[in-house]
Amino acid sequence: MPIQPTSKIWHNGNLIPWENATLHVMSHVVHYGSSVFEGIRCYTQPQGAAVFRLPEHMQRLLDSGKIYRMALPYSLDELCAAVVDTIEANGIAPCYIRPIALRGYGEVGVNPKGSPVEIYIANYPWGKYIGGEAADVCVSSWNRLAPNTMPALAKAGANYMNSQLIRMEADTNGYVEGIALDVNGLVSEGSGENVFLVRNGVLYTPPLANSALSGITRDSVLTIARHLGLAVMEQPVPREMLYIADEVFFTGTAAEVTPIRSIDRILVADGKTGEITKKIADEFFSIANGLKPDRFGWLTPVKVNATEPVTA
Ligand code: PMP
């Protein structure tokens, strides 16, 4: 889906026109993938709009920067306020928010320390990421990042070269997404989503040690599941568990809670969305959209004239 430009982008403390948020081709990030970023959603509410788990996302941005020795010259509170300012300046909700910190124009060598850190925050309207009711996916022939190569807990631009291989292979073979295994052949995650499965009433998801990103939706689903009284296991998941699971679903800011209908053309149970997936999705969307109380303190209100939910 083509991006829909808005009016302003936040850059190093100032709101600048969308079309002025450009980079020089010799910027470090263009050559070496030296960026860390976030993807956040702002949902409409009965009374306005709110950002979902804003401090957790901005803390992950700071953490990603720390892993790469890319100190961001703003506090957590300042970064959260910058996101709110950007959304309010553009007046768009619901929307997707993309904060990114990158190594800009400076030196040309691999060592990033001579290239300045630039921070941008953009927001724009965005609908469903994985279209349709339920997803037909494959297990990718590409593995996720091996430990001690590219740190999987950093949400870094360069990691998404691996994600692109997973996603393109799935697309080429007629699937909407791929699930990647880690280097040891255990289930890791999708190209941009964490993965959950249900078997005999127990909810399973791979631990972060299996090269998965520390997904904020993953954490939200774990919290919701525990509060619903479900048995939850963060434990290594062998590939074949996917084929014999009663329910499988993706979680992510973009994917939200997306049921999986089949894996490698093997139907998940009878191919219909399972009851536990439905319960968790219902709770997740009810909280995000302000239809149930925000009992975990996940919402940061923003002042915009909320528009209709985007469904494209
Ligand atoms: N894994 C990967 C590789 C991702 O890109 C994402 C999206 N950020 C996720 C998992 C899900 O993370 P979150 O729920 O924080 O969006």
Image: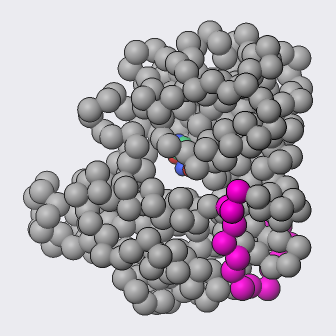
Q: Position of residue 108 (x, y in %)?
A: 12, 63
Give the overall secondary structure of the magenta segment.
loop
Q: Quadrant of residue 107?
A: bottom left
Q: Is residue 7 left or right of residue 132?
A: left
- Identify whether 20 is placed above or below 76: below
Q: Nearer the viewer, residue 18 or 302?
A: 302
Q: Position of residue 98 (x, y in %)?
A: 53, 66
Q: Name the residue located 12 percent from the left edge and 57 percent from the top edge.
A: 111
Q: Name the residue located 45 percent from the left edge and 61 percent from the top edge.
A: 59
Q: Position of residue 5 (x, y in %)?
A: 60, 77
**Quadrant of image for the C terminus:** bottom right
Q: Name the residue located 45 percent from the left edge and 79 percent from the top edge.
A: 78
- Identify whether 39 is placed above or below 226: below
Q: Is residue 297 magenta?
A: yes
Q: Nearer the viewer, residue 5 or 304?
A: 304
Q: Is residue 161 left or right of residue 251?
A: left
Q: Nearer the viewer, residue 256 or 122?
A: 256
Q: Is residue 259 magenta?
A: no
The part of the chain drawn in magenta is 296-312
Q: Position of residue 244 (x, y in %)?
A: 73, 10
**Quadrant of image for the N terminus:** bottom right
Q: Is residue 208 left or right of residue 30?
A: right
- Identify whether 188 is placed above or below 43: above
Q: Quadrant of residue 33?
A: bottom left
